[in-house]
Structure formats: C-alpha cells, structure tokens
C-alpha cells in the first residue's frame, strides 16, 4: 500500500506545471543546417581513419583531446578547456602477431591485452592449456608452466547463432521500453582487495610462464584485447593476448591431444607515464541569462585499442560536436548556456563524467583508498548526497553512446514529468523515425552518475544496427560501422533538444533527490520491539 501510494503521488506531482512549446521555425533551420551543411561524418572520419584508437591516456587520445578542443574553438565556442582527473598509465600497441608453427604453420588472429607489457622481440613457446578461472585452479598447475604461453580461458564449445547481426527496432520492440521497473536495492559487498586477475598474473610470473592468452568472447575472428590494469604500480608482469575463438579452440584441441603446439609471437607496446591525468574536453555556447543555469550534452571520446572506436564512440562524439556546430552556425542565442563535454575514461568506469559530477554537482562519501572499478561500483553506495553549487544550475544532461544508429526516442529514467514534454519535442521528428518516449531507466554510460545525484539526465534510444553483435569494443569497430543518414538525424535531434531545454521557461522537472533506500529483496533484518 505504501509503495502504491508513493508511486501515485509521484505521478500526480510529476504533471508538468507549464506548457512547453516548440519553435517549429527554429527546428526547420536546424534540420536544414544539419542536412545541407553537415560535418558529422567528416568529424567521425578524422577521429577514426586519421587518429584511430583512443585508449584513455594513450598518444591517440591525446591527439583527439587536442583536435576536438581546436574544433570547438574554431566554431566559436567559449570557455573551451580541459578538466583533468587522476587516471594512470598511457599505453599504445605498436604491433603484434602470433602464428602457430608446430605441428603446422597457421597465422592466428589476436589482440594484445591493453596495459600488458610487450615481448623482448619475437619469441617461441609451447602452448599449455590451464583454465585458470578461480583461485582454486592454480595449485594443480604448479611446476607445469615454465617457459610456456598459457591459455587461461576455458575453451567453451561453439554456440548456435540465435539472433541476426544487424537490426533496427520494430515499433513493437520500442513499445516494450515504456515499462516502469521497480528499483531494486541490493547493496554490493565491500571491495575484497586484490582481484583474481592480479593473483593469477603473479602466479604465472612466479611459475616462469612467458605470456598468457584468453579466448575472445565472440565468434567470427573477432577480438577485443580489453584489459583493466592501468594504475601506476599495477602493471601486469607478463604479456597478454586475446585470441579469436576459432584459433583458441584449435590450440586447445592440439594441446589436449598431445600434438605439442608451438607458437611464435611478438608484441611491441609503449607505455607513457609523462602525464597520469585523464582529460575531459569542455566547451560552451554562452547563454544570455547568467542566472538561468545551463544544459549539457556529452559523449565519451575514449575507446578501446583493437579497432578505431567508431561506433563506440566516435559516432556519439561526432553527433555532439555536430550539434554544437549547428547551433553556432545558425547564430542561435540560448537563454541558458549549452555546455558540451567529451569524456575520458568511460571505458574503464565512467571516470571522466564521474569526476565532473564530483567536482561540480555533488559529493558522496567513498571508502578510503578505493580506486579503479571498485570506485565505480561503490560510488552510488555512499550516503548522503551533498549538492554543490552547480547542482541547482544544471537543468538537463543528454548523452549519446549507443553507436551510430538512428535515434528512435529517449529514455526518461523513471521521470514521468518529462514524458509529455519530450513527446512534444520529438513531434517534429516523427517522419524521421523518432517517436518513442520510454519511462525506463537505463545505465552503463555517462549519464549514469548525473542521474544518481538527481540531475535530469537522459540517454537516447538508438537502432542497434550491429553495435552489440560485431562492433562494440572489437577490432571491427571502424568507420564502415557508421551510417551517415542516421548520424545526421541524431545530431539534428540533439541540437533541437538542447535548444528547447536551453530556452524553456522553466528547467526540466526533476525527480526527488535520491536518499538511502531500504533493502528491497524482502530480507529485512527483524528487530524485536523494546520491552516495556
């Protein structure tokens, strides 16, 4: 009864108190500029074909930081600057290969695992299969790994494909997104200290292994090479490789049958410790009313290293930058400042956007000494939330990070009050396929920590294309993943939403400031009433 009453009260309180009107003439100008003079694909091409991988703190990321900031200045944005936060080591692959040489010669598809060291030139080593998936598995391989390259993944059997690799949302699928899901509060246990990866890597080093390899999580010669030990002083002791499923299973079969496979391999990498700060790129289109606050759009500039970071997330960056260019080119003078942010460190735990939230918007207690992914997982467990000055000034944040697919709508993060407003804002774009305003709450990218401190923060709904099946974090994430018409549409809609949010009479309605919830799994600890 209490839950139902609370939800009903929230829905009633969420009714907008002011009508939101859309300037259709302004929208028409945005559409014209975003189609006839679009730069969105040129931006994406430079980020991918010219700069390439943008691993956080890598030389490629440094070039991308400088280039995007220069473009913002070229277009006339103000307050263009970098905001730094402590991250860790820079890393770049300068080339790697692996080939089977015994019992026969076969080239293997691999990716060096990020932040692992390189080899001392070309090496040869026998393969040993040792599925080191938990601490209990280590003891049985003691004394058996010296001078070998160790396959540490369990070579699972191939699975039948049960989905098509490229798809767009149907109307029926979009309608399912408009479902309110009850929040679940299941507190995550505190950090347990050293990770199993650290324990495993130290074991391999102590046993005299020369390198290790994992199996790719996707079939079709797709590799990722994603590693997470980027902290200063936490570099893995051995070279690491991810091997394509088809090649990995072949090596495992040969090892199991006693055919004594031997591989030849090399990995040249470069660490960069000259600056351990990651940097967000910030730029503004100044508003006419300094008391009205600001609205924001953002996308993450960093990528993984196996591909060129096209769908993830040069696409989102290009749409955010193109929205800025459109608004500036049209000479639109918003009431509220429009701020554009290109985040760093998203792939390792949303570190760039989290730093912005902590620096400008709100503070939460954090366990002392917690860093890296443990900080990402633990940050929303800290109570209470203490707002900072910009908390009241930031009226809305819009994020793009689902590839290059056409925008089909927007998720409202359980904020029912913005539903009728967003429906009106989307109405001019119905013929472009953008219709769905979904109540659902989504996470996993840079709007997440804004939303976690009560800022109206939203992620657009985009057609999936082949983002999840082929491109996300893989060697196939290149410029060919992008769809020009979809990205032009996305930049136009984003520009229109930003102008609407910046010029509306009132800021977008907010949900209540989050407070510490009670456990929602039904396992409440029972406390007996005090005796009289």
Image: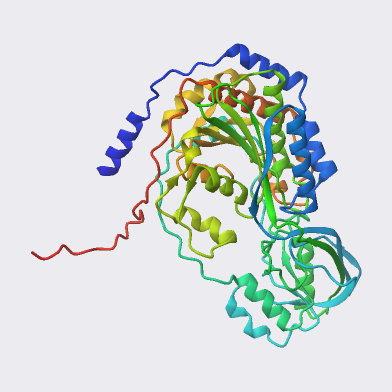
Give the residue at x 79% y 64%: 247
Q: Quadrant of residue 335?
A: top right
Is 433 displayed left or right of 524 in the figure?
A: right
Q: Name above or below for residue 399 compared with residue 523.
A: above
Which of 195/293 is in front?
293
Q: Quadrant of residue 491?
A: top right
Q: Residue furthest bottom?
A: 143
Q: Name above or below for residue 363 compared with residue 439.
A: below
Residue 163: x and y, percent?
Answer: 64, 46
Which of 495/333 is in front?
333
Is 405 displayed left or right of 262 in the figure?
A: left
Instruction: State the scheme by which the image is colored.
Output: rainbow
Q: Quadrant of the N terminus?
A: top left
Q: Name above or below for residue 142 compared with residue 219.
A: below
Residue 215: x and y, percent?
Answer: 72, 64
Q: Name above or below for residue 29 compared with residue 50.
A: above
Q: Residue furthest left?
A: 532
Q: Is residue 443 visible?
A: no
Residue 342: x and y, percent?
Answer: 67, 41
Counting every numbered tag in the picture gives 0
Q: Is residue 62 visible?
A: yes
Give the residue at x 71% y 52%: 56
Q: Quadrant of the C terminus?
A: bottom left
Residue 139: x and y, percent?
Answer: 63, 84
Give the residue at x 14% y 64%: 530
Which of 204/341 is in front?
341
């Amino acid at each position: 009864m209490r839950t139902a009453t609370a939800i009903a009260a929230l829905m009633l309180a969420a009714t907008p108190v002011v009508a939101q009107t859309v300037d259709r003439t302004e929208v028409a100008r945005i559409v014209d500029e975003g189609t006839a003079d679009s730069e969105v694909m040129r931006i994406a091409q430079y980020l991918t074909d010219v700069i390439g991988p943008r691993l956080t703190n890598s030389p490629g990321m440094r070039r991308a930081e400088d280039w995007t900031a220069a473009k913002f200045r070229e277009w006339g944005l103000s307050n263009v600057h970098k905001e730094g936060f402590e991250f860790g080591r820079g890393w770049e692959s300068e080339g790697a290969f692996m080939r089977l040489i015994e019992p026969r010669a076969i080239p293997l598809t691999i990716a060096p695992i990020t932040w692992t060291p390189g080899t001392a030139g070309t090496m040869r080593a026998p393969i040993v299969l040792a599925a080191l998936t938990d601490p209990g598995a280590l003891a049985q391989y003691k004394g058996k790994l010296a001078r070998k390259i160790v396959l540490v993944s369990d070579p699972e059997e191939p699975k039948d494909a049960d989905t098509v690799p490229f798809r767009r949302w149907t109307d029926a699928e979009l309608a399912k997104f408009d479902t309110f899901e009850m929040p679940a509060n299941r507190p995550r246990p505190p950090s347990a200290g050293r990770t199993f990866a650290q324990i495993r890597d130290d074991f391999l080093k102590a046993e005299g292994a020369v390198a290790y390899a994992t199996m790719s999580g996707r079939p079709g010669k797709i590799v990722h090479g994603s590693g997470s030990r980027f902290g200063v002083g936490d570099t893995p002791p051995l070279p690491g490789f991810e091997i394509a499923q088809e090649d990995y299973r072949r090596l495992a079969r040969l090892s199991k049958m006693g055919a004594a496979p031997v591989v030849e391999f090399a990995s040249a990498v470069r660490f960069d410790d000259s600056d351990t700060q990651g940097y967000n790129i910030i730029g503004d289109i100044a508003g006419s009313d300094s008391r009205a606050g600001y609205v924001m759009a953002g996308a993450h500039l960093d990528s993984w290293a196996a591909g060129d970071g096209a769908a993830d997330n040069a696409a989102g960056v290009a749409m955010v930058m193109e929205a800025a260019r459109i608004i500036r080119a049209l000479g639109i003078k918003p009431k509220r400042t429009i701020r554009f942010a290109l985040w760093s460190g998203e792939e390792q735990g949303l570190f760039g956007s989290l730093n912005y939230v902590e620096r400008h918007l709100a503070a939460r207690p954090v366990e002392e000494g917690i860093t890296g992914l443990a900080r990402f997982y633990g940050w929303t467990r800290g109570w209470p939330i203490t707002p900072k000055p910009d908390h009241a000034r930031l009226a809305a944040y819009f994020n793009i990070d689902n590839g290059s697919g056409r925008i089909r709508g927007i998720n409202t993060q359980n904020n029912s009050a913005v539903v009728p407003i967003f429906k009106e804002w989307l109405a001019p774009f119905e013929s472009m396929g953008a219709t769905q305003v979904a109540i659902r709450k989504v996470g996993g990218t840079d709007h997440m920590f804004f939303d976690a401190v009560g800022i109206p923060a939203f992620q657009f709904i985009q057609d999936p294309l082949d983002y999840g099946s082929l491109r996300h974090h893989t060697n196939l994430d290149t410029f060919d993943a992008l769809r020009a018409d979809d990205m032009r549409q996305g930049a136009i809609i984003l520009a229109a939403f930003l102008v609407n949010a910046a010029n509306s009479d009132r800021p977008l309605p907010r949900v209540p400031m989050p407070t510490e919830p009670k456990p929602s799994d039904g396992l409440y600890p029972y406390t007996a009433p005090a005796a009289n």
